[in-house]
Image (cartoon, helix red, strand yellow):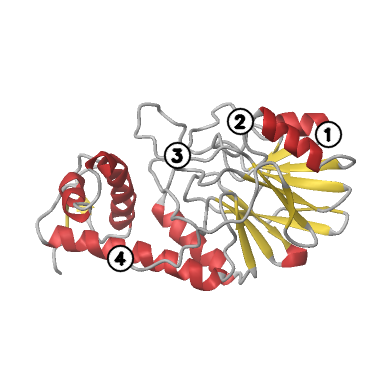
Amino acid sequence: MTSIPFVREFEFEYGRCDQLSPLVRRVVANNPGPFTYTGTGVYIIGRGEVAVIDPGPVIEDHVAALEAALEGERVTHVFVTHHHLDHSPMAHPLAQKHGAKVYGYGPQSVAPAGGEVRLEAGDDVGFKPDVEIRDGDTFSGPGWTVEALHTPGHTSNHVCYALKEENTLFAGDHVMAWSTSVISPPDGHMGDYLRELARIRDRDFDLLWPTHGPAVREPRAFIQAYIDHRMERERQILEQLNNGQDTIRDMVAVMYADIDKRLHPAAAHSVLSHMIHLVETGRAHCDGEPGLQSVFRLPQPA
Protein backbone atom coordinates (compact mmCIF):
# COMPACT_ATOMS: atom_id res chain seq x y z
CA MET A 1 0.00 0.00 0.00
CA THR A 2 1.00 3.63 -0.49
CA SER A 3 3.00 4.91 2.47
CA ILE A 4 1.29 7.76 4.33
CA PRO A 5 3.77 9.92 6.33
CA PHE A 6 1.90 9.52 9.60
CA VAL A 7 2.91 11.65 12.58
CA ARG A 8 2.16 10.07 15.96
CA GLU A 9 4.43 12.00 18.31
CA PHE A 10 2.28 14.46 20.20
CA GLU A 11 3.35 16.82 22.97
CA PHE A 12 0.45 17.58 25.30
CA GLU A 13 -0.84 17.22 28.84
CA TYR A 14 -4.44 16.39 29.74
CA GLY A 15 -6.33 19.45 30.90
CA ARG A 16 -3.54 21.89 30.05
CA CYS A 17 -4.42 24.79 27.76
CA ASP A 18 -1.70 25.12 25.11
CA GLN A 19 -1.21 28.22 22.97
CA LEU A 20 -0.74 26.85 19.44
CA SER A 21 -0.69 30.10 17.46
CA PRO A 22 -1.60 33.76 18.05
CA LEU A 23 -5.31 32.92 17.67
CA VAL A 24 -5.56 29.24 18.65
CA ARG A 25 -5.44 27.35 21.95
CA ARG A 26 -6.16 23.67 22.67
CA VAL A 27 -7.29 21.58 25.62
CA VAL A 28 -7.09 17.77 25.25
CA ALA A 29 -9.73 15.66 26.99
CA ASN A 30 -8.69 12.52 28.83
CA ASN A 31 -10.65 10.11 26.62
CA PRO A 32 -7.96 8.14 24.75
CA GLY A 33 -8.96 5.09 22.73
CA PRO A 34 -8.74 3.30 19.38
CA PHE A 35 -10.86 5.97 17.66
CA THR A 36 -9.74 9.04 19.62
CA TYR A 37 -5.98 8.34 19.79
CA THR A 38 -4.79 10.41 22.78
CA GLY A 39 -8.19 12.08 23.23
CA THR A 40 -10.37 14.88 21.90
CA GLY A 41 -8.54 18.12 21.16
CA VAL A 42 -10.83 21.09 21.86
CA TYR A 43 -9.84 24.26 20.01
CA ILE A 44 -10.43 27.78 21.31
CA ILE A 45 -10.22 30.59 18.75
CA GLY A 46 -9.58 34.20 19.69
CA ARG A 47 -9.42 36.10 22.97
CA GLY A 48 -12.16 37.66 25.01
CA GLU A 49 -15.05 36.68 22.74
CA VAL A 50 -14.10 33.25 21.47
CA ALA A 51 -15.27 30.29 19.42
CA VAL A 52 -14.87 26.68 20.54
CA ILE A 53 -14.63 23.74 18.11
CA ASP A 54 -15.64 20.20 19.15
CA PRO A 55 -16.00 20.66 22.93
CA GLY A 56 -15.78 16.90 23.40
CA PRO A 57 -17.21 14.59 26.08
CA VAL A 58 -18.91 15.51 29.34
CA ILE A 59 -16.18 14.33 31.72
CA GLU A 60 -15.78 16.09 35.07
CA ASP A 61 -12.05 16.79 34.75
CA HIS A 62 -12.46 17.93 31.14
CA VAL A 63 -15.33 20.27 32.02
CA ALA A 64 -13.18 21.81 34.76
CA ALA A 65 -10.21 22.20 32.39
CA LEU A 66 -12.35 24.00 29.81
CA GLU A 67 -13.78 26.29 32.48
CA ALA A 68 -10.26 27.19 33.60
CA ALA A 69 -9.09 27.82 30.03
CA LEU A 70 -12.09 30.07 29.35
CA GLU A 71 -12.02 31.99 32.63
CA GLY A 72 -12.85 35.66 32.06
CA GLU A 73 -13.91 35.04 28.45
CA ARG A 74 -17.25 34.63 26.70
CA VAL A 75 -17.92 31.86 24.21
CA THR A 76 -19.93 33.32 21.31
CA HIS A 77 -19.94 30.28 18.98
CA VAL A 78 -19.72 26.54 19.63
CA PHE A 79 -18.87 24.69 16.41
CA VAL A 80 -19.23 20.92 16.00
CA THR A 81 -17.61 18.98 13.15
CA HIS A 82 -19.96 15.97 13.40
CA HIS A 83 -22.24 13.96 15.67
CA HIS A 84 -19.91 11.41 17.30
CA LEU A 85 -19.76 11.06 21.08
CA ASP A 86 -16.14 12.15 21.31
CA HIS A 87 -16.94 15.48 19.62
CA SER A 88 -20.39 16.89 20.44
CA PRO A 89 -21.82 16.01 23.91
CA MET A 90 -20.29 19.02 25.70
CA ALA A 91 -21.49 21.46 23.01
CA HIS A 92 -24.89 22.38 24.44
CA PRO A 93 -23.85 22.56 28.11
CA LEU A 94 -20.97 24.87 27.16
CA ALA A 95 -23.16 27.03 24.92
CA GLN A 96 -25.88 27.33 27.55
CA LYS A 97 -23.40 28.45 30.18
CA HIS A 98 -22.17 31.28 27.94
CA GLY A 99 -25.43 32.21 26.26
CA ALA A 100 -24.09 31.03 22.91
CA LYS A 101 -25.50 28.84 20.16
CA VAL A 102 -24.28 25.50 18.80
CA TYR A 103 -23.46 25.39 15.09
CA GLY A 104 -23.33 22.23 12.97
CA TYR A 105 -24.53 20.81 9.68
CA GLY A 106 -27.58 19.04 11.03
CA PRO A 107 -28.58 15.37 11.27
CA GLN A 108 -26.76 12.72 9.30
CA SER A 109 -28.47 11.55 6.11
CA VAL A 110 -28.75 7.95 7.34
CA ALA A 111 -29.51 7.50 11.02
CA PRO A 112 -27.63 4.70 12.83
CA ALA A 113 -29.64 1.47 12.77
CA GLY A 114 -27.87 -0.21 15.69
CA GLY A 115 -26.25 -3.61 15.69
CA GLU A 116 -23.71 -2.68 13.03
CA VAL A 117 -19.99 -3.28 13.45
CA ARG A 118 -18.78 -0.50 15.72
CA LEU A 119 -16.20 1.37 13.69
CA GLU A 120 -16.33 4.64 15.56
CA ALA A 121 -16.59 6.10 19.03
CA GLY A 122 -20.41 6.08 18.86
CA ASP A 123 -23.17 8.34 17.55
CA ASP A 124 -24.48 11.23 19.63
CA VAL A 125 -28.00 10.41 18.47
CA GLY A 126 -29.61 13.21 20.47
CA PHE A 127 -27.36 15.92 19.07
CA LYS A 128 -28.99 18.71 17.11
CA PRO A 129 -27.36 22.09 16.46
CA ASP A 130 -29.15 25.31 17.31
CA VAL A 131 -28.09 26.69 13.94
CA GLU A 132 -27.79 24.45 10.87
CA ILE A 133 -24.92 25.77 8.80
CA ARG A 134 -24.11 25.20 5.15
CA ASP A 135 -20.97 25.08 3.04
CA GLY A 136 -19.37 28.50 2.73
CA ASP A 137 -21.10 30.11 5.71
CA THR A 138 -18.80 32.48 7.61
CA PHE A 139 -18.77 33.57 11.23
CA SER A 140 -16.64 36.17 12.98
CA GLY A 141 -15.50 37.58 16.28
CA PRO A 142 -12.84 40.06 17.43
CA GLY A 143 -9.86 39.35 15.16
CA TRP A 144 -11.08 36.02 13.78
CA THR A 145 -13.15 34.75 10.85
CA VAL A 146 -14.27 31.13 10.46
CA GLU A 147 -15.58 29.56 7.25
CA ALA A 148 -17.60 26.31 7.32
CA LEU A 149 -16.66 23.68 4.74
CA HIS A 150 -19.11 20.79 4.41
CA THR A 151 -16.90 17.72 3.98
CA PRO A 152 -19.08 14.59 3.81
CA GLY A 153 -17.37 11.21 3.74
CA HIS A 154 -16.48 10.19 7.28
CA THR A 155 -20.09 11.13 8.03
CA SER A 156 -22.63 12.81 5.78
CA ASN A 157 -22.79 15.84 8.08
CA HIS A 158 -19.08 16.36 8.70
CA VAL A 159 -17.89 19.99 8.63
CA CYS A 160 -14.36 21.37 8.70
CA TYR A 161 -13.73 24.96 9.80
CA ALA A 162 -11.21 27.30 8.18
CA LEU A 163 -9.61 30.12 10.18
CA LYS A 164 -9.02 32.73 7.50
CA GLU A 165 -6.53 34.89 9.43
CA GLU A 166 -4.07 31.99 9.76
CA ASN A 167 -4.97 29.95 6.64
CA THR A 168 -5.58 27.02 8.99
CA LEU A 169 -8.18 24.26 8.83
CA PHE A 170 -9.74 22.51 11.81
CA ALA A 171 -10.16 19.16 10.11
CA GLY A 172 -12.22 17.15 12.61
CA ASP A 173 -11.91 13.49 11.53
CA HIS A 174 -11.66 14.30 7.81
CA VAL A 175 -7.85 14.20 7.84
CA MET A 176 -5.73 13.04 10.79
CA ALA A 177 -1.95 12.95 11.14
CA TRP A 178 -1.88 9.68 13.10
CA SER A 179 -4.29 7.48 11.09
CA THR A 180 -6.60 7.21 8.12
CA SER A 181 -10.24 8.17 8.63
CA VAL A 182 -12.99 5.55 8.91
CA ILE A 183 -15.44 5.57 5.98
CA SER A 184 -18.28 3.21 6.86
CA PRO A 185 -21.55 2.94 4.90
CA PRO A 186 -24.37 3.77 4.94
CA ASP A 187 -23.65 7.23 6.36
CA GLY A 188 -20.00 7.27 5.30
CA HIS A 189 -19.46 7.60 1.55
CA MET A 190 -16.19 7.02 -0.29
CA GLY A 191 -17.05 9.05 -3.38
CA ASP A 192 -17.92 12.08 -1.27
CA TYR A 193 -14.81 11.57 0.82
CA LEU A 194 -12.41 11.46 -2.13
CA ARG A 195 -13.99 14.54 -3.68
CA GLU A 196 -13.72 16.50 -0.43
CA LEU A 197 -10.13 15.37 0.16
CA ALA A 198 -9.23 16.85 -3.23
CA ARG A 199 -11.07 20.08 -2.45
CA ILE A 200 -9.29 20.52 0.88
CA ARG A 201 -5.95 19.70 -0.75
CA ASP A 202 -6.50 22.35 -3.40
CA ARG A 203 -7.34 25.05 -0.86
CA ASP A 204 -3.62 25.00 0.07
CA PHE A 205 -3.98 25.49 3.79
CA ASP A 206 -0.77 26.10 5.70
CA LEU A 207 -1.77 23.80 8.56
CA LEU A 208 -4.45 21.31 9.56
CA TRP A 209 -5.52 20.81 13.18
CA PRO A 210 -7.41 17.48 13.49
CA THR A 211 -9.62 16.89 16.53
CA HIS A 212 -7.38 13.96 17.52
CA GLY A 213 -3.61 13.97 17.60
CA PRO A 214 -0.96 16.31 16.21
CA ALA A 215 -1.13 18.81 13.37
CA VAL A 216 -0.69 18.04 9.68
CA ARG A 217 2.10 20.46 8.75
CA GLU A 218 2.39 19.78 5.01
CA PRO A 219 -1.27 19.45 4.07
CA ARG A 220 -1.03 19.19 0.28
CA ALA A 221 1.49 16.34 0.23
CA PHE A 222 -0.15 14.58 3.17
CA ILE A 223 -3.65 14.69 1.67
CA GLN A 224 -2.32 13.48 -1.66
CA ALA A 225 -0.83 10.48 0.14
CA TYR A 226 -4.27 9.89 1.71
CA ILE A 227 -5.84 9.92 -1.77
CA ASP A 228 -3.12 7.69 -3.24
CA HIS A 229 -3.69 5.18 -0.43
CA ARG A 230 -7.40 4.96 -1.28
CA MET A 231 -6.69 4.65 -5.00
CA GLU A 232 -4.27 1.81 -4.38
CA ARG A 233 -6.88 0.04 -2.25
CA GLU A 234 -9.30 0.27 -5.17
CA ARG A 235 -6.68 -1.19 -7.50
CA GLN A 236 -6.24 -4.09 -5.07
CA ILE A 237 -9.99 -4.71 -5.01
CA LEU A 238 -10.23 -4.69 -8.80
CA GLU A 239 -7.32 -7.13 -8.90
CA GLN A 240 -9.19 -9.43 -6.51
CA LEU A 241 -12.25 -9.29 -8.75
CA ASN A 242 -10.11 -10.11 -11.76
CA ASN A 243 -8.71 -13.12 -9.84
CA GLY A 244 -12.18 -14.48 -9.12
CA GLN A 245 -12.72 -13.19 -5.57
CA ASP A 246 -16.25 -11.89 -6.08
CA THR A 247 -17.49 -11.33 -2.52
CA ILE A 248 -16.27 -8.92 0.12
CA ARG A 249 -15.67 -11.80 2.50
CA ASP A 250 -13.35 -13.49 -0.01
CA MET A 251 -11.53 -10.24 -0.76
CA VAL A 252 -10.95 -9.50 2.92
CA ALA A 253 -9.60 -13.02 3.53
CA VAL A 254 -6.91 -12.38 0.93
CA MET A 255 -6.23 -8.65 1.32
CA TYR A 256 -6.15 -8.71 5.13
CA ALA A 257 -4.66 -12.18 5.62
CA ASP A 258 -1.88 -10.77 7.82
CA ILE A 259 -4.11 -9.00 10.37
CA ASP A 260 -6.09 -10.35 13.33
CA LYS A 261 -9.27 -12.00 12.03
CA ARG A 262 -11.23 -10.20 14.73
CA LEU A 263 -10.60 -7.05 12.69
CA HIS A 264 -11.99 -8.56 9.49
CA PRO A 265 -15.57 -7.30 10.06
CA ALA A 266 -14.27 -3.73 10.24
CA ALA A 267 -12.12 -4.35 7.17
CA ALA A 268 -15.21 -5.63 5.36
CA HIS A 269 -16.99 -2.32 5.95
CA SER A 270 -14.00 -0.45 4.55
CA VAL A 271 -13.99 -2.65 1.45
CA LEU A 272 -17.75 -2.14 1.11
CA SER A 273 -17.26 1.63 1.01
CA HIS A 274 -14.85 1.15 -1.89
CA MET A 275 -17.17 -1.31 -3.64
CA ILE A 276 -20.06 1.15 -3.49
CA HIS A 277 -17.82 3.77 -5.11
CA LEU A 278 -16.64 1.32 -7.79
CA VAL A 279 -20.24 0.39 -8.62
CA GLU A 280 -21.30 4.04 -8.71
CA THR A 281 -18.48 4.84 -11.13
CA GLY A 282 -19.18 1.82 -13.37
CA ARG A 283 -15.95 -0.03 -12.62
CA ALA A 284 -17.77 -2.92 -10.93
CA HIS A 285 -21.28 -4.35 -11.03
CA CYS A 286 -23.60 -6.29 -8.75
CA ASP A 287 -27.28 -7.18 -8.66
CA GLY A 288 -29.23 -4.70 -6.55
CA GLU A 289 -27.69 -2.30 -4.06
CA PRO A 290 -24.09 -3.11 -3.07
CA GLY A 291 -23.91 -4.78 0.33
CA LEU A 292 -21.72 -7.02 2.44
CA GLN A 293 -23.37 -10.13 0.95
CA SER A 294 -23.36 -8.97 -2.68
CA VAL A 295 -21.62 -10.84 -5.47
CA PHE A 296 -19.57 -8.44 -7.57
CA ARG A 297 -18.21 -8.65 -11.12
CA LEU A 298 -16.16 -6.57 -13.49
CA PRO A 299 -17.85 -4.90 -16.48
CA GLN A 300 -17.90 -6.92 -19.66
CA PRO A 301 -15.45 -5.65 -22.32
CA ALA A 302 -17.15 -3.57 -25.03
How far apart marks 4 and 2 lie (CA) works out to 37 Å
How far apart marks 2 and 3 lie (CA) works out to 16 Å
Instruction: State which tag comes first along the sequence, 2 or 3.
Output: 3
Q: Which residue is mark 3?
A: 120
Q: Name the one closer to the observer, 135 or 104.
A: 104
Q: Which residue is mark 4?
A: 1
Give the vertical position of 92 relative to 243 (above or below).
above
Instruction: State which tag comes first along the sequence, 1 or 3.
Output: 1
Give the vertical position of 267 relative to 83 (above or below).
below
Tell me the SS state at disc 3.
loop
Q: Bin the neighbour count of mark 3 within 10 Å (Cα to Cα): few under 14, some 14-19, many 20 and up.
A: some
Judge whether residue 298 can be spotted in this image: no
Q: Which residue is mark 2?
A: 127
How far apart marks 3 and 4 lie (CA) works out to 23 Å
- Kindly identify the amino acid type of the residue bearing the numbered disc 2: Phe
Label total for image: 4
Q: Which residue is mark 1?
A: 98
Instruction: State which tag comes first along the sequence, 4 or 2.
Output: 4
Q: Name the one closer to the observer, 228 or 15.
A: 15
- Kindly identify the amino acid type of the residue bearing the numbered disc 3: Glu
Give the vertical position of 192 relative to 168 (above or below).
above
Q: Are marks 1 and 4 in contact (CB under 8 Å)?
A: no
Instruction: State which tag comes first along the sequence, 2 or 1.
Output: 1
Numbered tag placed on residue 146 in the rendering: none
- Kindly identify the amino acid type of the residue bearing the numbered disc 1: His
Q: Residue at x 35, y 27 (%)?
A: 115
